[in-house]
Image: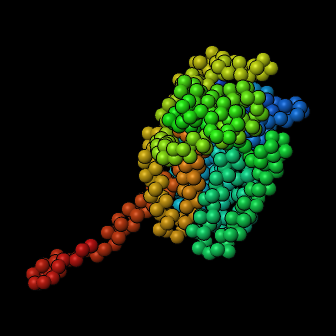
Amino acid sequence: MAGESFRHRIAAHPDLVAILLIVLVAFALRSAFAFRVPAFVTKDSIEYVEPALALVDGEPFILAQRRTPVYPIFMGGAVALFGRDLLAITFAQHLLGIATAVFTYGIGRLTFGRAAGLLAGLAAALSGPLLIYEHYLITESVFTVLLTLAMLLLVAGLRSERRAYFAAGGLALGLAALTRPVGQAVLVALPFAALFVFRRWRPSIMAVALAAGCFALLVVPWAIRNQVIYGTAGAASTGRFLISRSVKHERKFIFFEKEVGAFPGEAPQRTRARQIAQEVTDKRPEPGQVFQRIRDELKLTEAQTDAMLRDIATEAIMRDPMLWVSGTVDMFYELLKGAPKEESVAWHQDVHDQPRVANSWGARFNYLLEPPPPAHVNEAAEAKRLAQIFRPTRFAWWIVGLGLVGAALSVLVRAYRPAVLPFLVALVLIGVSAMLVGDVPRYRYPVDPLMYVMAAGGIVGLATLAMRLVRREQAAPEPSVSGLAGESCSPGRTLPVS
């Protein structure tokens, strides 16, 4: 009786069972991984750690012009809650990874059904790149969870036409954009998805207006703040990204030609900025040196330097737009394919271990950095194994192909129409990254949960089609032996096709 009662409860709450299974898998993996590896850091991590600790200590909350506020605020909360340690921050980010897996289930559940949601949620729970980047002191984990939350709310709005979902989705999207400004690109996909699903102008306009209005409630004040402080209205800077794309990932753009020299009427500062960009391109160092050299030599502010970089990068692109287009296509392909090295814990430990950034962090914060302790060294092999349970690059083209099947189903099957939003958002975000940043794999990983949803939808769609064909085959009446004999002897008649 007790067993029957338990099975009845499970059958009565299948969504709860699926969510609990995803949470269990995600939590088990993250609890096993979280303290086996030191936190991964980059030279940029200090620009989030410093304001986060200032917030905890009651000091002024000051951000560089290109940084957005949500991630350092989250870091400050993690430190206040779990302790003044880098692993305390990454532990909080691993908890966000569990939420990402649950939200992924919700998106799949609302678009393609429970089975697709379960497959997508488990893929997000086990994904090696998502796990590894939850262990970084950079924005990936927070942006990913906010993006998936926004998609869940907006998809729920597309299914139900309830305005509250679009308003909440706009707020979540605003937080995502204040974590990483590329989140603004989602607003490009929403109008097309709303019109495709609703097939009517009025509800489509209302949905987009609500989402955009609530998005603006969060993003516009920050843009105004940037205008007041830095003289540029925007969620963040773009010049660094464009120059990085043009200098590091292409290296064929021409910024300055000696035989041409300065352009007619060009300011000497701008001419020198183009010379520096060309020197960096020719010598092939890191593109960050372009920003620092121009800023230091020309005595510009951070905002002025970013504007100068945006100007000269745009000019170089417009001079050879086909180079930019072909490069974007190639980088889009590379982002879809993924980078196997990014799924290796050993590679991340080698490239982004803590002692490497000691000089850029400064003496004030070096107490947070340490070489890997013996316990971490001894557990390195186990951490590597845990991060390779699910390596998406091994199935990259299966994920893409099945995702396209899921996209086709969203067009052909009315019940699946809301899935067009995560499909479009994945395309837009990967495309924008290829256009503005280049082939940087970590900019694609926040899109992975949406790709898992579409691939799971493709699997479920193909499985459903196969089952229907089998049932139709089994349901077709089989002709009797005598009937077949009679039909075969009758001229001009053909046998029935079952």
Q: Residue at x 64, y 27 (%)?
A: 289
Q: Residue at x 60, y 69 (%)?
A: 195
Q: Residue furthest front?
A: 264
Image quarter where the C terminus lies is: bottom left
User: On the rendered structure, is 367 left or right of 197?
Assistant: right
- The image shows a total of numbered marks equal to 0
Q: Nearer the viewer, residue 291 or 359?
A: 291
Q: Residue 421: name its quadrant.
A: bottom right
Q: Is residue 233 above or below residue 140?
A: below
Q: Does residue 276 appear anywhere in the picture?
A: yes
Q: Nearer the viewer, residue 108 or 350?
A: 350
Q: Position of residue 246 (x, y in %)?
A: 56, 37
Q: Residue at x 63, y 22 (%)?
A: 353
Q: Residue furthest right?
A: 58
Q: Nearer the viewer, residue 48 or 467?
A: 48
Q: Position of residue 212 (x, y in %)?
A: 72, 60
Q: Residue at x 48, y 58 (%)?
A: 406
User: On the rendered structure, is 411 left or right of 178?
Assistant: left
Q: Position of residue 70 (x, y in %)?
A: 76, 42
Q: Residue 271: name its quadrant.
A: top right
Q: Is residue 145 above or below residue 63?
A: below
Image quarter where the N terminus lies is: bottom right
